[in-house]
Image (cartoon, grey):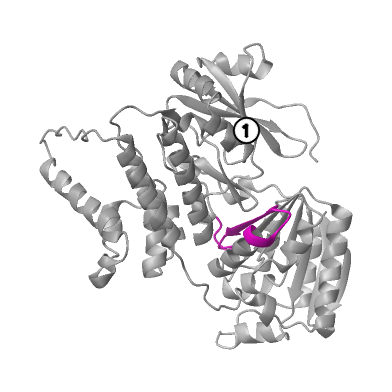
Amino acid sequence: MKKTVERSMTKANSGSFRDPSSRVYTIDLPENGSSAIFRGVDNKTLENFKKLQTEPFYQQLEIEKRVVKTKLCAPDDPVAKEILEAGWAGVMQHEPVSIVSYSYEWSFAMLRRAALLHLRILTDALEAGWTIKDSTPFNIQFEGTAPVFIDIPSFVPWQEGEPWLAYRQFCCCFLTPLMMRSHLGINHLPLLRSYLDGIPPVEAANFFRGFSRFKRGVASHIMLPARVEKRIEARERDAVPAQDRSQRKVSRKYVLALVESVTRLVKSLSVNIEHTDWSEYDKTHTYDDEELQAKKGFVQKFVQEKKPYCLMDIGCNTGTFSKIAAEHADLVIAADGDHDAVQKLFMHESGHSVHNNILPLVLDLSNVSPNQGWAGKERSSFDSRANPDAILVLALVHHIRISANIPMALFLDWLRSFNCDIVIEFVDRHDEMVVKLLQNKTEQYLDYDRVAFEHELKERFKVRTSKDLKGGKRVIYHIEPQ
C-alpha cells in the first residue's frame, strides 16, 4: 500500500477550467507519485452537493463504487483554507483514481461500458428528481476494468419541463464513435483524439453513405441532427442574428424514455474481434512449452521480488504476462497498439478476473498520447500520467526498431526516463519473427543485433540478470537505471 507522505504545493488542475462552478486542485505526494484530489466549488454547487449526499440513489451509487467517494472538507482544514482563499464557497475531497486515462485510449468495449455507466447513473438521477448536466467521457475513469464517474458537480436538480440537456454531447462523445466502429468498422480512437469535444453530427454524417444511413440509430442520432445544424448554420451565418432556439418543455417521463431508448441502442452495438498476430498471440507465439515457462518464470520472479505498486506492460498483446504481474502488483497498465488484443484482454478481465487491477489501454507505442487541448495542457501526455515503478517490455524492441523505424538508442532513452526497474526481451535477427519483418524491407538495420543492443543497454542501465531463450535467438534481461 502507498505510504502517507508530506504534501507538496496545491495546484489547479490544467484540465479543469471549462465549468466555472468548480475547479479541481491536486496535491502531489512526491515520494510515491500519487496525488490527493480536492475541488473548489461555488455556492450553488456546494448547496447542491449537501442535498445530493442525502439522496438514497446517490448513496447507493457510492456504495456500488459507480461514483467516486467524495466528502466536504471542514473550513479549517489546511488544504481547504488554501483553496477557499481562491474565492470558492466550499471544498470537496475526492478519492483519487489510480491513473487517469482518456477515451482515445479505450477499446470499443471500454467506451461502451463507460457509456452504459453514464446512462445508468443518469436514469437513477432522473428518477430521483436530478439530472447530469455534462456527458463527456472525461468525467469517467477506470479502476482496472470498472468505470467510475468522477465529476460530482455534474449532478444538478432536474427542472420541470427540462429536456436531456447533454444529449448532443453524449451522442458526440459516446454514441457516434460507438456506431461508427460498430456499423462501419471505422477506428474511433484517432477521431476522439482529434475531436476532444466529441465527433460533431455534421462530420459524422460524412462517413455514412448509402444503406449505412439506415443502420440502427444513424438516422435519428446522426443524420437528423446534422441536417438541423446545417440548416441553423445557413440561416444564421454572417451578420444574421441568432434565433431563439429554446426547446419545448417535456415531461420527465419523456426524458427517461429517451435515455432508455439510447441505452438499448448502446447495448445493441458490438464489434467482432478480428484475427491478428496480436489478438491471437496467446495461441500463435513461437515459444515451445518449456521456453514459454522459462520466460514466465523469469517475469514471475521479477514481480515477486519487486512487488511494484504500478507495473506497466507495454506491448502486452492479450495480457499473458500482465496477468502474471497482477498477482503481485497493485496496478498493471497493460498497453498495446492492437485494438483487438486490448479489447480481448478487457473483456476477459471484466468477465473473469478476481483482481480487477489490470487497466488495458490502446496505445500506439511509437506515438503515445501527447499533451493537447487548450494551451497544450488540458489533456496530459501518457508519459506524464503513467508513473510505473516497474516495466515489462517483452518481444517489442524489434517492432519498435524495424516496423516503426525508431533507433534503439531513442527507445532505450524513453524507457530510461521512467527511472525504474525493467524486464526487457531482445529478439535477435535470426529469430523467425525478425526474419519475417525484414523479408520485404531494404536492409537498413545493420545496427540491430545483440552486441549493439547490449552496448546501448549498458550505457543507460545496469543488467541485474539475464537468460537466453530459444537457443539464444532471444534473451530476457532484468535491468535497473544506472
Would residue 125 appear left or right of 144 to someone viewing this image?
left
> Is residue 164 in sight in this rendering?
no
Q: Quadrant of the C terminus?
A: bottom right
Towards the viewer: 156 or 87? 156
Towards the viewer: 412 or 325? 325
Vertically, is 150 above or below 325?
Answer: above
> Is residue 449 in sight in this rendering?
yes
Q: Is residue 348 magenta?
A: no
Q: Quadrant of the N terminus?
A: top right
Would residue 334 appear left or right of 181 to someone viewing this image?
right
Helix, strand or loop under label 1: loop
Q: Residue at x 36, y 42 (%)?
A: 256
Quadrant in which residue 134 is drawn:
top left
- Quickly name the residue at label 1: 69
Residue 321 percent coordinates (x, y): 74, 66
Vertically, is 88 above or below 247?
Answer: above
Towards the viewer: 55 or 179? 55
Neighbourhood count class around disc 1 (C-alpha, 10 Å): few under 14, some 14–19, many 20 upward? some
Quadrant in which residue 334 is drawn:
bottom right
Vertically, is 96 above or below 111?
Answer: above
Residue 399 percent coordinates (x, y): 63, 73
Quadrant in which residue 135 is drawn:
top left
| Tally of numbered discs | 1
Residue 301 percent coordinates (x, y): 88, 63
Magenta range is 350-368
Would residue 435 appear left or right of 193 to someone viewing this image?
right
Residue 461 percent coordinates (x, y): 81, 59
Q: Is residue 362 magenta?
A: yes
